[in-house]
Image: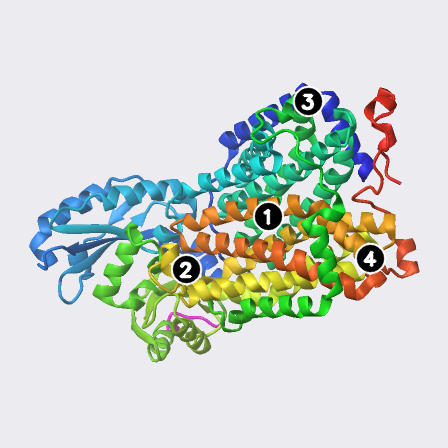
C-alpha cells in the first residue's frame, strides 16, 4: 500500500502541471455532465414494503389525480374581521396564484367550506400539475415566494402543507465562512506562513467543489436527498483541511530535519499519506454503510458523504504533491512568526511529560475520564426522537406561519392528516367495505373527523382522509395510527407524513443493529490489520462509542431539554431528529478513527523502535499532539459554523459533531489512550500467531527516517530508498 501511494504521489510530483490540468478537466467534465443530466433533489422517506409505501404505490398506479402534489394557500385577516368581508381581495389572490408555474387549480375556500368557525382563517387547496417529488425544490421556492408575497395590510397570505415544508429552500448562513476563517487562523499558528496555511483550505474547497458536481450527477440516477450536499459538504470541508494539514505538517517537518523537497515529500506521502488513505477509507466505509438501513434518504446521504471524503483523499495524494512540488521553498512564503524557533527535545515537551504523568497514575485518570463521559452521555437514557414538522421551522418562514395559522383555526391535528387508501381489486376488497372501514376508523380513539371518500376513475382505489387530535410529531398521533391500522383490513393502508416517518423509524429499529455492527466490525478489522493487535482496535471501538454517546447526551440536554437553547437561536425545546442521530453515528465513528490512526501509528512506530510501552505512548503523544490538536480545532470550527444555520436539524448535526471531536481530542486521546495503554502494557500489541500469519502486512508509519542529508543521497535514489522496513 505504501509503495502504491508513494508511486501515485511521485507521479503527480514529477508532472505537476499535468496533474493540475487533469483536476481542472475532471471538475469541468463533472459539472458539464451535471448541467446536462443532473437530476432534481428529493427526499425519499419511504420504507420499502411498509404500509405507507404501499399506499403511495397504489395512488401512483391507480389514482394519479390523488397522487398529484397539493399545497394550501392559507388566508387570515389581520384586523380581526371575517374572511367573507374580503371576498374580492381573496378572489384576486387566488386568480394570481392560479397562474404561477406548476399550479393546476386552486379551490374556492368559501365553496369548499374550508374556513374556520370564527371566519378569520381559511385555506384554499392548490393542486399542482405533478407529484411533488417531480417538481423539485427550486420550483417550490419560486412558488412559496410568489404566493406568500400576495398579502396586503388587511390580508395575510401564506403557503403551507407538508410538500412546502419538505421542499423549503435552504437558508444559507454566513457562519460557514467564519468557520473557514477560524481554520485559516489555526493553520497560520501551526505553520507560521500564509502559503502553508492557505494550501489545505484551498485543497479542501477543490475537493468539495468536485464532489458537489458528482452528487448532482448522482441525482440523475437515483433519488438524492436535498440535504445530501449540506451534510456531505460539512464533512468534506473538515476532512479536506485535516488530511492536507497532516501531510503538509509532515512534509515541513522533514524539510526542517534537513531533507530536500523531493525526499521530504516522498517521506510525507509514505507515512502521513498512507495514514490519510486508511483514515479516509474508514470514513468512506462507515458512511457508505448507511445503505444497509434500506432507506433512500440515508443511502443517498451516505453515498454523497463517502464521495466527498473520497475526493478529499484523492486530492491529498495527487493534487497536493503537485502543488508542493511547484511551491518548493515558497511553501514558507508569507511568514507571520519568526523564522527560527529553538528546537524542543521530545523529553522536554509538555505532551511527553503529560503522557508519562498519566502512565504513572492510570487508574485515577481512566476512572475520572470514564465518569465524565458517562455523565455527558447520561441524558441519552431519556432521548425521544421525532421527525421535524413545519412547526419546528424558523418562525419567519411561510410554511411555519401557515402551520401556526392552521393550528389556530382548525386544531393541531389538521397539520397531521392521515390518508387512508383502499385497494378494491384485492380479493378481500369490495365497494361495500368502504362504509364499514370508515365507520371503524371513526370509532378509533384519537380520530376527530373523516373526509369524504373519493374513488378512482376505474373504481379500483378509494382514498379519504382522517384527522387525528395530535400534531405530526406527537407520540399520541403515532399511537392513533397504530390503533387505526389494527382495525383496518389487509387491503387498506394508511399513509401521511406521520405514518411515513413512523414506518421509517420502524425500519431503522430493524436495521440499526446490523448497520452499527457492520461499521464497528469493519473499523475493528482495519485497525487490527494496521496495528497487528487485538486490544488496540477493541479499545478504539469502545472509546469511540463513549465519545459518540457524550455527543448524543449533549444533544438531548440542549435540544430536547432546552438547556441553553436560546443561545443557539431556538425558541425552546426542539424534538431530536431521528435521521440526524443515525447520520451522525458513521460520520463520528469514522472521524474518531482518523485520530486513532494518526496517534496509534506514531505510538506503534516508537514501540517498534524502543520496545518501551510507556515511552512509546509519551513519544507518540509528543509527536502528534500539536498537529492533531490543531486538526481537531479546525474540525470543531467548521462544524460549529453550521450551528448558525436557522434549521434546527443542521444545528443538531453541527453541534453533535463538534462535541464528539472535542471529547475525542481531549479526554479520549490525552487521557484514555495513555491510561489504558499503560494498564495493558505489552499486551496492547498482542496478536495470535495464526492470525498474524494470516493477515497481510501493512505499515502506516515508517519507523526509520534517513540519517543523511540530501547532499549525501544521489538524486535518482532519494525516492527509492524510502521503502519502510
Q: Secondary structure at mark 1?
A: helix
Per the image, the residue denoted by label 4 is: 613
Task: Examine the rendering and report whether any part of residue 629 can be seen.
Answer: yes
Identify residue for label 3: 328
Q: Position of residue 626 (x, y in %)?
A: 65, 45
Circle number at residue 388: 2
| Residue found 61% across the figure and 61% down from its top | 547
Q: How far apart in space, not on screen, are marks 1 and 2 (Cα)?
A: 30 Å
- Name the quarter where the C terminus is drawn: top right
For the record, the magenta segment spans: 428-433
CA–CA distance in space, label 1 to label 4: 26 Å
**Which image quarter: residue 271?**
top right
Mark before the other along the chain sequence, 1 or 4: 4
Depth check: give the residue in front, 179 or 80. 179
Q: Are marks 3 and 1 in contact (CB under 8 Å)?
A: no
98 sits left or right of 327 in the view: left
Q: Decide which of 697, 151 is in the foreground and name it.
A: 697
Q: Residue 292 shows which numbered tag?
A: none
Amino acid at each position: 500500500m505504501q509503495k502504491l501511494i508513494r508511486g501515485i504521489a511521485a507521479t503527480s510530483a514529477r508532472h505537476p502541471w499535468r496533474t493540475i490540468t487533469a483536476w481542472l478537466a475532471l471538475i469541468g467534465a463533472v459539472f458539464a455532465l451535471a448541467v446536462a443530466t443532473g437530476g432534481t433533489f428529493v427526499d425519499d422517506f419511504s420504507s420499502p414494503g411498509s404500509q405507507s409505501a404501499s399506499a403511495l404505490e397504489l395512488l401512483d398506479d391507480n389514482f394519479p389525480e390523488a397522487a398529484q402534489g397539493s399545497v394550501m394557500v392559507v388566508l387570515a385577516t389581520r384586523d380581526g374581521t371575517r374572511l367573507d368581508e374580503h371576498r374580492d381581495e381573496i378572489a384576486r389572490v387566488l386568480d394570481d396564484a392560479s397562474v404561477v408555474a406548476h399550479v393546476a387549480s386552486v379551490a374556492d375556500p368559501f365553496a369548499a367550506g374550508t374556513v374556520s368557525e370564527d371566519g378569520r382563517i381559511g385555506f384554499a387547496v392548490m393542486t399542482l400539475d405533478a407529484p411533488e417529488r417531480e417538481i423539485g425544490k427550486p420550483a417550490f421556492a419560486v412558488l412559496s415566494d410568489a404566493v406568500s408575497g400576495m398579502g396586503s395590510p388587511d390580508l395575510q397570505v401564506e403557503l403551507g402543507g407538508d410538500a412546502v415544508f419538505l421542499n423549503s429552500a435552504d437558508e444559507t448562513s454566513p457562519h460557514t465562512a467564519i468557520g473557514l476563517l477560524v481554520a485559516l487562523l489555526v493553520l497560520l499558528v501551526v505553520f507560521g506562513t500564509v502559503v502553508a496555511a492557505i494550501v489545505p483550505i484551498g485543497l479542501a474547497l477543490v475537493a468539495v467543489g468536485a464532489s458537489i458536481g458528482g452528487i448532482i450527477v448522482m441525482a440523475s440516477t437515483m433519488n438524492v436527498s436535498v440535504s445530501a450536499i449540506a451534510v456531505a459538504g460539512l464533512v468534506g470541508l473538515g476532512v479536506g483541511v485535516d488530511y492536507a494539514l497532516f501531510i503538509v505538517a509532515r512534509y515541513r517537518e522533514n524539510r526542517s530535519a534537513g531533507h530536500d523537497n523531493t525526499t521530504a515529500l516522498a517521506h510525507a506521502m509514505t507515512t502521513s499519506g498512507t495514514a490519510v488513505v486508511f483514515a479516509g477509507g474508514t470514513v468512506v466505509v462507515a458512511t457508505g454503510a448507511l445503505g444497509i438501513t434500506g432507506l433512500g434518504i440515508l443511502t443517498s446521504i451516505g453515498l454523497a458523504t463517502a464521495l466527498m471524503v473520497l475526493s478529499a483523499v484523492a486530492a491529498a495524494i495527487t493534487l497536493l504533491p503537485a502543488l508542493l512540488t511547484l511551491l518548493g521553498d515558497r511553501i514558507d512564503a508569507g511568514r507571520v512568526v519568526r523564522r527560527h524557533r529553538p528546537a524542543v527535545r521530545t523529553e522536554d515537551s509538555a505532551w511527553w511529560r503529560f503522557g508519562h504523568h498519566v502512565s504513572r497514575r492510570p487508574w485515577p485518570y481512566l476512572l475520572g475520564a470514564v465518569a465524565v463521559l458517562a455523565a455527558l452521555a447520561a441524558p441519552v437514557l431519556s432521548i425521544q426522537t421525532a421527525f421535524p414538522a413545519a412547526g419546528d421551522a424558523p418562525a419567519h418562514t411561510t410554511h411555519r406561519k401557515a402551520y401556526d395559522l392552521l393550528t389556530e383555526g382548525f386544531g393541531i391535528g389538521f397539520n397531521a392528516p392521515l390518508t387512508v387508501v383502499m385497494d378494491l381489486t384485492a380479493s378481500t376488497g369490495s365497494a361495500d367495505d368502504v362504509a364499514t372501514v370508515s365507520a371503524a376508523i371513526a370509532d378509533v380513539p384519537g380520530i376527530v373527523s373523516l373526509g369524504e371518500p373519493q374513488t378512482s376513475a376505474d373504481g379500483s382505489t378509494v382514498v379519504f382522509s382522517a384527522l387525528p387530535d395530535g400534531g405530526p410529531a406527537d407520540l399520541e398521533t403515532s399511537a392513533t395510527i397504530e390503533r387505526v391500522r389494527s382495525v383496518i383490513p389487509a387491503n387498506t393502508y394508511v399513509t401521511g407524513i406521520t405514518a411515513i416517518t413512523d414506518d421509517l423509524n420502524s425500519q431503522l429499529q430493524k436495521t440499526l443493529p446490523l448497520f452499527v455492527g457492520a461499521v464497528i466490525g469493519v473499523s475493528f478489522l482495519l485497525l487490527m490489520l494496521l496495528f497487528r493487535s487485538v486490544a488496540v482496535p477493541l479499545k478504539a471501538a469502545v472509546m469511540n462509542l463513549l465519545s459518540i454517546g457524550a455527543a448524543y447526551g449533549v444533544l438531548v440536554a440542549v435540544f430536547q431539554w432546552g438547556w441553553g437553547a436560546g443561545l443557539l437561536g431556538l425558541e425552546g425545546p426542539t424534538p431530536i431528529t431521528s435521521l440526524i442521530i443515525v447520520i451522525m453515528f458513521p460520520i463520528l465513528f469514522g472521524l474518531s478513527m482518523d485520530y486513532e490512526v494518526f496517534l496509534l501509528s506514531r505510538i506503534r512506530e516508537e514501540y517498534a523502535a524502543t520496545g518501551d510501552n510507556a515511552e512509546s505512548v509519551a513519544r507518540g503523544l509528543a509527536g502528534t499532539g500539536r498537529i492533531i490538536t490543531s486538526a481537531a480545532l479546525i474540525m470543531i470550527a467548521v462544524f460549529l459554523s453550521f450551528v448558525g444555520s436557522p434549521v434546527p436539524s443542521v444545528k443538531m448535526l453541527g453541534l453533535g459533531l463538534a462535541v464528539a471531536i472535542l471529547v475525542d481530542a481531549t479526554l479520549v486521546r490525552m487521557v484514555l489512550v495513555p491510561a489504558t495503554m499503560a494498564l495493558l502494557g505489552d499486551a496492547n500489541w498482542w496478536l495470535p500467531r495464526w492470525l498474524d500469519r494470516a493477515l497481510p502486512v501493512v505499515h502506516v508509519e515508517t519507523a526509520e527516517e534517513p540519517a543523511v542529508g540530501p547532499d549525501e543521497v544521489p538524486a535518482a535514489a532519494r525516492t527509492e530508498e524510502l521503502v519502510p522496513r
